[in-house]
Image (cartoon, rainbow, N blue to C red):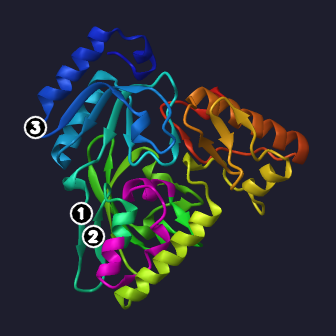
């Protein structure tokens, strides 16, 4: 059997064979593509393509894709809105799965005020629909350029709120295709992390709002958060905060104190607006971004003695291999 570790040496014919096996295993409604560019599917707008890319049309097709990938030793990577990751310039050797489309974008309010949502639902759309329904508690998610699945995996947070503050249970599929529903109490959740989703796929969640309120009042709070975010975060293409905040400190403050705002490598720049953002000035490559990350880490370590750890994902690779 071919192993995931040897896939980078596969010839184009081997990838075509893998693609053919995937196509044969799913319904015609599922999209299967080869060498699909990924940069435009991310907020950083850098990186190469996926050797294999799929948008499953159903839970059953997702299970079939995972089964074929496992049987052929193909590495599998999940892609949401691409807001917290950097795709390497060489692309990704493996199968990239995107839970896109209506099948994954459920928003179903219940009579008791709880809401069933799909993993592909955009956070902005979740906030908008919740506001119309008069449900309080999701406003902090409005400005995060991600989807429910990514927010669950990363326990996304903003404006003092965290994704798992509003989660009651999560529907999860293992890489073996087994579907289970786990209550929040059974999950191991901490800063920017849900352990159970490291090697599994969030299909959706049951959310409980903080309260019910007038839709107009909720929308006013959303506008307040949006304005605050626009004033404090850069507007250029980025992957969000690059580094985790060290315990009791702020990564952005440390970088700023080291005089790194405006530091550039090629088309990548440490944002003059928020030092924990690296922005794409329009011509950046993933190589530029990674070189700037290394430079920032080295300067902060030298000046302040702190080892900053990446918060964003290096897609298809390990940070240990490039830092």
Alpha-carbon span between mark 1 and mark 3: 21 Å
| Location of residue 70 by image quarter | top left
| 116 w.r.t. 50: above or below | below
| 9 w.r.t. 82: above or below | above
Mark 3 crowdedness (10 Å alpha carbons): few <14, some 14-19, many ≥20: some
Q: What element carries label 3?
A: loop
Residue occupying image coordinates x 40% and y 37%: 40
Residue occupying image coordinates x 23% and y 35%: 65
The numbered mark, 1 or 3, whose residue comes first in the sequence reads 3
Residue occupying image coordinates x 60% and y 60%: 191
Mark 1 crowdedness (10 Å alpha carbons): few <14, some 14-19, many ≥20: some
Give the residue at mark 2: 116
| 280 w.r.t. 205: above or below | above
Assess whether mark 3 and mark 1 are in contact (beta carbons under 8 angstroms).
Answer: no
Alpha-carbon span between mark 3 and mark 2: 26 Å
Q: What element carries label 1?
A: loop
Mark 2 crowdedness (10 Å alpha carbons): few <14, some 14-19, many ≥20: some
Give the residue at mark 3: 27
Rendered location of residue 69, percent (x, y): 29, 29
- State the extent of the magenta-drawn residues as a range: 128-154
| 127 w.r.t. 214: above or below | above
Task: Please give the label number shown on residue 159.
Answer: none
The numbered mark, 3 or 2, whose residue comes first in the sequence reads 3
Please, which residue is most extreme toward the left here? 28
> Which of pointers 1 and 2 indicates the residue nearer the eye?
1
Give the residue at mark 1: 106
Residue 210 visible at all: no
Assess whether mark 2 and mark 3 are in contact (beta carbons under 8 angstroms).
Answer: no
Drawn side of residue 295 relative to residue 202, left or right: right
Please, which residue is most extreme toward the front here? 282
């Amino acid at each position: 059997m071919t192993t995931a570790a040897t896939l980078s040496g596969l010839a184009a014919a081997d990838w075509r064979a893998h693609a053919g096996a995937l196509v044969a295993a799913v319904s015609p409604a599922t999209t299967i593509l080869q060498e699909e560019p990924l940069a435009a599917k991310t907020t950083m707008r850098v990186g190469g393509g996926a050797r294999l890319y799929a948008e499953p049309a159903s839970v059953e097709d997702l299970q079939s894709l995972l089964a074929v990938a496992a049987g052929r030793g193909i590495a599998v990577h999940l892609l949401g809105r691409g807001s917290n990751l950097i795709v390497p310039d060489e692309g990704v050797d493996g199968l990239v799965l995107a839970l896109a489309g209506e099948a994954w974008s459920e928003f179903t309010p219940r009579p008791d005020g709880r809401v069933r949502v799909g993993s592909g639902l955009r956070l902005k759309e979740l906030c908008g629909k919740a506001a119309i329904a008069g449900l309080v508690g999701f406003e902090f998610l409005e400005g995060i350029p991600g989807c429910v699945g990514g927010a669950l995996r990363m326990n996304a947070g903003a404006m003092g709120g965290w994704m798992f503050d509003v989660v009651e249970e999560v529907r999860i599929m293992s890489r073996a295709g087994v579907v289970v529903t786990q209550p929040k109490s059974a999950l191991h959740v901490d800063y920017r992390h849900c352990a159970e989703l490291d090697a599994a796929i969030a299909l959706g969640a049951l959310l409980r709002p903080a309260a019910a309120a007038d839709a107009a009042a909720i929308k006013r709070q959303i506008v307040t958060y949006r304005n605050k975010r626009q004033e404090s975060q850069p507007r250029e293409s980025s992957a969000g905060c690059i580094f985790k905040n060290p315990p009791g400190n702020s990564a952005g403050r440390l970088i700023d104190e080291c005089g790194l705002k405006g530091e550039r490598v090629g088309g990548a720049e440490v944002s003059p607006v928020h030092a924990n953002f690296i922005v794409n000035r329009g011509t950046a490559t993933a190589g530029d971004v990674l070189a700037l990350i290394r430079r920032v880490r080295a300067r902060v370590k030298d000046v302040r003695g702190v080892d900053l750890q990446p918060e964003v994902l290096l897609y298809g690779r390990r940070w240990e291999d490039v830092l």
